[in-house]
Amino acid sequence: MPGANRKVQRLWAALLLSSTFLVPALPVMAQQSGNDAAALAATVPADAKMLLSANELVYNKDADRVIVRGAVQINYGGYQMVARQVEYNQKSGRIIATGEIELIEPSGNKVYADHMDVTSTFSDGFVQTMRVETTDLTKLAAVNGERRNGNEFILNQAVYTACTPCATDPNHRSLWNIKAERIIQNGTTHTIRLEKAHFELFGQPIIYLPAIEVPDQTVKRQSGFLFPRFRYTQKLGFGASVPYYWAIAPDMDATVTATGLTRQGFLLEGEFRQRFEMGEHVLRMAGISQMNPESFTSGTEDADHTQRGMIASKADFQFNPRWSFGWDVLVQSDNNFAKTYDLSTFDGTTLTNQAYLTGLGDRNYFDLRAFYFDIQDADPSSAAENQQAIAQVLDYSATAPNPVAGGELSATINLTNIKRNRLDAYTVANDERFRGLEGTDHRLTAELEWKKQIVVPGGLVLTPLLAARGDAIGINVDRPVGYSGDFTNDDAVTRGMVTAGLEARYPMLFTTPHSSHILEPIAQIFVRPNEQYAGGLPNEDAQSFVFDATTLFDRDKFSGFDRIEGGTRANLGIRYTGTLGNGYGVRAIAGQSYQLGGVNSFATDDLVNAGANSGLETDRSDYVALVGLDAPSGFTGSFSGRFDKDEFSLKRTDLSAGYEGIRWQTAVTYTSIKAQPLYGTNYDQDEIKTAASYRFQDYWSVFGSVTYDLNYNVVTRNSLGITYDDQDTVFSLVYKNERDPDQQLANDWSIGARISFRTLGDINVGDASFKDLD
């Protein structure tokens, strides 16, 4: 009977508990003020029920108290709590929890504490020895804290830090933290305010902060000052930049950066960004009134101007999944402003201004672009920019959706218009070469190609091909004076080319219990007439190309439309692909090309002598080969070479090897190009480049690279750096040194540093990037 009585008592207590905890929270809310009630109503739904489980329950009817002990779990209105003991006072409507408390809020934030005294809606109360973890793994810890109105935490004697690795490694300690007398987490303003704070790095206080306010984990964008940036250059002096970010609206924001330079004064930069339903637009501006232009070299663009500035616009709009339109343009006061002041994305020697319209279909492609090339040069008399082409280019290609005569029919159209304000010429071995002619020329090209794959009995794969091309060319340029070739005197010409080709491949499969091998001999022949006007027309887009194994089987090996490969040519080679059972993969191509009839286009005169020393200028070409290896250990290697047809000596070599493991990552590249005096290079070019990175401890890595010119026996570039990255703290220190190969110019070295604190911001000094292993 005593056991039965205890069961009855527990059941009665459970019923009483249910009648107390599983009702809407309206009676408790009625005891609050009107403002508090509104706040709580927004925190917990009016019809919320409280679910509870525990090992033991005690109900004191006289005191209107319910105490639960042992593995207590409470779920109420999206709040979840676990604790050793929870006491609920019906009269005061408060919950007192003790012992290893964990409270998960509806937002996902977690609160840990030893003692918690809160209202039944968890919106108000006091907490002792507490810790808060937000959903972005930001951590707040305090001796005690107070919760107000369900959306504000006030923490006393608190610590703030961000610790992503702690999610998987509880023993990890962040390198930095902020200790404050008071931290206020405001759920209404979505900010975390730290008052009377010390920033500590490696456990040592380094900065005192009277007050600092950062956005909480729910904020993606918030107006405010960003971390300052620092730099130093000889002509500009020491610079300190203070950026201010302005979140104007959900679809637009801006960043204004003020930079003080000790030698040149005050540089102001602005960037305005706006998103649209179809895309985005970025507008950038910068300007300075130079305080000391005479510190620059006399007679340069930098020294000749006091008021300097630039404006740039970049946009990209997606009309639909197939069509996009945009532009990227820069206008500046002189030719060297953006480069001198190292303005991000505008500090290169050549800047490409363009506008474009692009369409991509299932079997067709359309691209229309207009180009203007801005050459940044400190020489006021430089003609480099006027020698650049102002170009408009239209490309269109389409493939018939259905087979035509059992094969694939495709069409290609190219329309190019070129205008150049000044002749671009140079001399090689007393012979004049012309990269571009002064004046205007335009060309319309249309080409049709049909090909069909046929597999004959026995496995032989035959691919017949027919192609027809026509060009209409308008020429309004100054004729090249001193050109050794025969340049046309006509203002308008037409030319055509028809090709009949056949490719034969015989793939042979060899298998073993642990590997498979495919050996594929390939033979091609293309029959066509001689190239019309070979070397007699402007050549803008076919000035250079590399003959190697990757271009061996191309129908037309020229790199652009301005030249057409003519004559009858055969390409012979063999291709191998192997897959080994132990995870190794091997690939290889080798072969040679033959001019069987007609005039060899690569041996004819050209404005830049494009075919000279290419390996294709003779009836029997040089040999080309490529071998690649992929290993399961992370090693990759490749070799590509062009061998002299008679002596079998290497004319061009590209050798690369790399390894990527858990701790090591390394890459070695060797390039060798023998002298090409007829093309314009009178000396061998041999260079070896190495780069490596080693992670010697969790989060710590060292890296470096060396580029060595074997002809001049000099290191042309080297770098060395160290980095720490635990996702919350990123620290990098990089030394870079670049030397001129002829050793006539002074070395250019730099030291860059970056330190980044997650949720706080970045501090940058110079360039601390390392891209040699990308």
Image: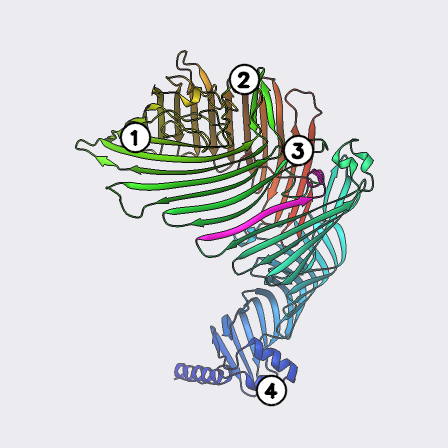
Vertical arrangement, residue 624 with respect to residue 463, above or below: above
> Residue 593 got which mark?
none
Q: Nearer the viewer, residue 606 or 272?
A: 606
For the residues labelled 3 and 1, the Cα–Cα distance comes to 57 Å
How packed mark 1 is, by other alpha carbons closer than 10 Å (few <14, some 14-19, many 20 or more), is: some
Q: Is residue 412 visible?
A: yes
What x and y, as percent, mark residue 518? 28, 30
Residue at x 61% of width, y 71% of height: 116
Q: How far is disc 3 from disc 4 in space, using C-alphas?
A: 68 Å
Amino acid type at circle 1 is Ala
Tell me which numbered mark, 3 or 4, is placed earlier along the sequence.
4
What type is the residue that disc 4 sits on?
Answer: Ala
Q: Name the front one of labels 4 and 2.
A: 2
- Say which quadrant the N terminus sits in: bottom left
Q: Earlier in the sequence, mark 4 or mark 1?
A: 4
Instruction: Residue 480: name its quadrant.
Output: top right
Residue 518 seen in the current view: no
Name which residue type carries label 2. Answer: Asp
- Point out which mark residue 500 bears: 1
Provide the residue designation for mark 2: 684
| C-alpha gap between disc 2 and disc 3 | 30 Å
Q: Nearer the viewer, mark 4 or mark 1?
A: 1
Residue 771 lies, in percent from the top left, at 57, 37
Q: Is residue 212 left or right of residue 99?
A: right
Relative to 2, does residue 352 appear above or below in the rendering?
above
Please identify the residue farthest to the bottom as the structure is shown: 62
- The residue indicated by pointer 4 is 30
Residue name at image x 71 percent, y 48 percent? 286
Residue type marked 3 = Tyr
Q: Which of labels 3 and 4 is toward the front?
A: 3
